[in-house]
Amino acid sequence: MNDLRQVGELYNSICDAIEEKNKAIASALKNRQGTKSLREEKKRLKEQLKSFVDSLTPEQYQAYKDYKKIRRQIKVSKFQKQCDKIEKKVFKKLNPAYIYMIPAGIGAVFFTLLPCIFMIVGSFFKLDLVNLSKSEFRDIWNYQMIFTRDKEFLRSIGNTVIFAILTVFLLMIVTTLMSAWLSRNTKIHNFAQTLIFTPHISSMVSVAILWTLMLDPVGIVNQVLALFGIEGPNWLMDTRTSLISVALVTVWKSIGYYCLIIIAGLQSLPKDVYEAAKLDKASKAVIFRKITLPLLAPTLSFVFIMKFINSFKSFAAIDVMTQGGPQGSSMVLGYWIYNEGRVKFNYGFSMAGAVIMTIMVASFVLLSQYLMKRNSQTDKPSKRKLKQTQIRGKDNER
């Protein structure tokens, strides 16, 4: 037993000496002193440790392994304690939430804030992206030109607003009614949810190509109308139907995604409210209008805002199906910005248009948030009434 203890003591003494030499070497390097003699002593100690291990009996070697394992664990625990101390010092000075937000903050700065700053600054210049030193400062000349002389820009704003209103309201009506039917938990309804969600998985380009073929003058849509004696128009080449056609395709693709959001909202509604309404012998239409829609208002507001913002970003469908034509009838703001920047190389005009579109979207979002807060304050009495309805329903059960 004493022999085994001596093995551990000797092993520890050699390891301590090696660690001291490491510290001495580090100190010498810091003070820019010679380390040759220290390195030789360290090498001699390592050779001594190796010869000591080679001379051990099997029993002593097992004791050496145990001591080595214990020493490593002590070393790790010391390092862990040092890390914990540093972590506590850092967390005392900073909120942990801010530390975890640093990667997202860096991404937001480089991929959102800096491009926005470049866009705003570039809107006041005649930009030459090949050689920025040749760019000319024009003050607000770009804005004056697109508002006074570029009729296509003004038309694109009008088309964008019409496109947004058309897609948003059509989507809201269709998805709300479909979600009310699809919210039932049966095999048929679950299969229908999957089927409706399928177009959202596909890319907008492939969907646009499919509908371009279907809306062709000799496509399947006009062939179906011909069966009923209706002569279909040239959907994508007619100034009256081109924008409407693209809007319908956009709505068709996004129905499944927004349906799932509304279904999730419907399934989270309290069931006792509906039970109380049934006890009062309320019809399905009254329940939907008086209970479902008011309780679903936050979810519907979210869908409304998200679809409105996405409608301003519409590009792929326009590019594939109409290229902004015919005669600019389907030219939306996003496609006008692309056309000015990447086709005509008027980057100053393009960035000025992008700034205006950003202001329009931001204004809409702020207005929507204000109206939602206002509605939530006015809805407090209605929540009281809802509670009274629940109590009345329970009394009727008794």
Image: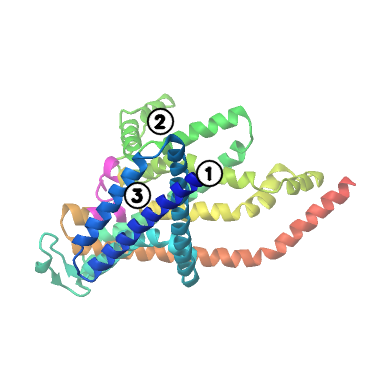
Q: Is residue 1 above or below residue 103?
A: above
Crowd rating for badge 1 (residues with CA inside 10 Å; few <14, some 14–19, many 20+)? few
User: Looking at the image, which residue is at 61% across and 51% down?
Assistant: 296
What's the CA distance linking mark 3 and mark 1?
A: 82 Å
Residue 147 in view, yes or no: no
Q: Amino acid at mark 2?
A: Ile
Q: Earlier in the sequence, mark 2 or mark 1?
A: 1
User: Looking at the image, which residue is at 23% across and 57% down?
Assistant: 39
Disc 2, SS: loop
Q: Position of residue 213 (x, y in %)?
A: 31, 31
Q: Nearer the viewer, mark 2 or mark 3?
A: 3
User: Looking at the image, which residue is at 61% across and 37% down?
Assistant: 181
User: Which residue lies most toward the front here?
Assistant: 2
Name the residue that disc number 3 marks. 314
Residue 231 magenta-highlighted: no
Q: Position of residue 152 (x, y in %)?
A: 25, 58
Crowd rating for badge 3 (residues with CA inside 10 Å; few <14, some 14–19, many 20+)? many
Q: Position of residue 167 (x, y in %)?
A: 43, 48
Q: Amino acid at mark 1?
A: Met
What's the CA distance linking mark 2 and mark 3?
A: 31 Å
Q: Is residue 252 above or below residue 297?
A: above
Q: Amino acid at mark 3?
A: Ser
Name the residue that disc number 1 marks. 1
Name the residue that disc number 2 marks. 230
Q: Earlier in the sequence, mark 2 or mark 3?
A: 2
